[in-house]
Amino acid sequence: MGALPEILEAQGTPVHLNTTVTRIERVGMRIKQVTVKQGDRTVQISADHFISSMPVTALLRCLDPAPPKDVIHAARSLKYRDFLIVSLMVKREHLFPDNWIYVHSPEFQVGRIQNFKNWSPGMVPDPSKTCLGMEYFCNEGDPLWQKSDADLIRLASQEAIDLGLGIRPGDVEDGVVIRQRKAYPVYDAEYRQNLRVIQDYLEAFDNLQTVGRNGMHRYNNQDHSMLTAMLAVRNILGEEHDLWTVNTERSYHEDFVVEKSQSQSSHPFRSKTRPRTSIAKRPATVLRKFISEDLEETVPMGSFQPSPDKVP
């Protein structure tokens, strides 16, 4: 386990991995207990408050009694884009300076390439090597998704060579494939009205909050997703935060960062929040990410038609 689960376990808070939620029992608009499956074991978990980051469609499907028909219909109408990453272990100390590169050339299937060593040297234990994440945007069940791990590693290795990234035949010594279902909530023409129905229903619960990209069907980044979880905990402690405004009302994020910076500035072991830089000063390779973050707010729905074979 990583550092966070170890800290939680040491404080008496168990972390259950490889656990599937099968039933969420409610009495009226209050969650009573959650039934989970751990291998061959079925366990009931009771609590005063519940925070869910699971796909909101799965959450509603697990509720017992089931939600009203209009809520079920809205949940079934939400769509997702899936994703897989092929991490290649390359016998090269340095390849290129970017954290990630977007690939738009139609002759390649890869859509984005991450250079993990450039995020942090600690992500590649052997400093003489580089790890590249070849990212493919797809749908569960399509031909790319159904390829074997070995075929995907061969495909990613050849595309990395053909893209001219400084990789030569024989440089890739190994690889691993990770498939992520429901990685991207789809913003289609109907998602707003469907999500509004779901949001109104979920907000009526006394002791349930949903957080994160899948929990809110919102194309949040990691910082926004973590912020919704942190504010959810503050709500349990008595504060009143509207989680659905995070990443739409920017002041929530900015005020929270300023507040945390001020509270940590006197701590001898904590650095101040790093100052923000304007988008214009960021490398061109990451501009598309910032554009996609703000897409819902700046582009009229229906006017953006990305190529379906690459764009997440």
Image: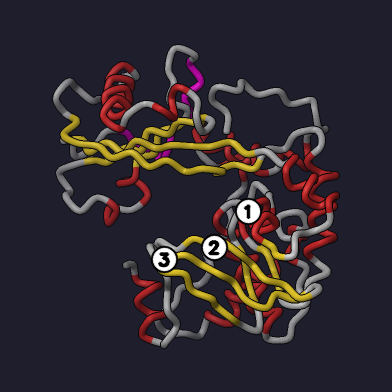
**Mark nearer the N terminus (2 vs 1):** 2
Residue 195 position, x and y percent, is 79, 49
Secondary-structure class at tag 2: strand
Q: Residues within 10 Å of mark 2 (few under 14, many from 20)?
A: some
Task: In this rendered view, identify the residue nearer to me: 156 or 59.
Answer: 59
Please report the residue visible at 63 percent of the width from the left and 53 percent of the height from the top. Answer: 58
For mark 1, what is the residue?
58
Q: CA distance from mark 3 to mark 1?
A: 18 Å
Query: What SS does tag 1 mark?
Result: helix
Q: Quadrant of the C terminus?
A: top right
The residue tagged 2 is 21
- Tell me, yes or no, whether the highlighted magenta stretch contains residue 275: no
Tell me if mark 3 has few (under 14), some (14-19) or many (20+) residues whose alpha carbon lies within 10 angstroms of its own.
few
Residue 158 seen: yes
On screen, residue 256 above or below 236 = above
Q: CA distance from mark 2 to mark 1?
A: 9 Å
286 relative position to 98: left or right? right
Query: Mark 3 belongs to which amino acid?
Result: Gln
The residue stretch that appears in magenta? 96-105
Dominant secondary structure, magenta: loop
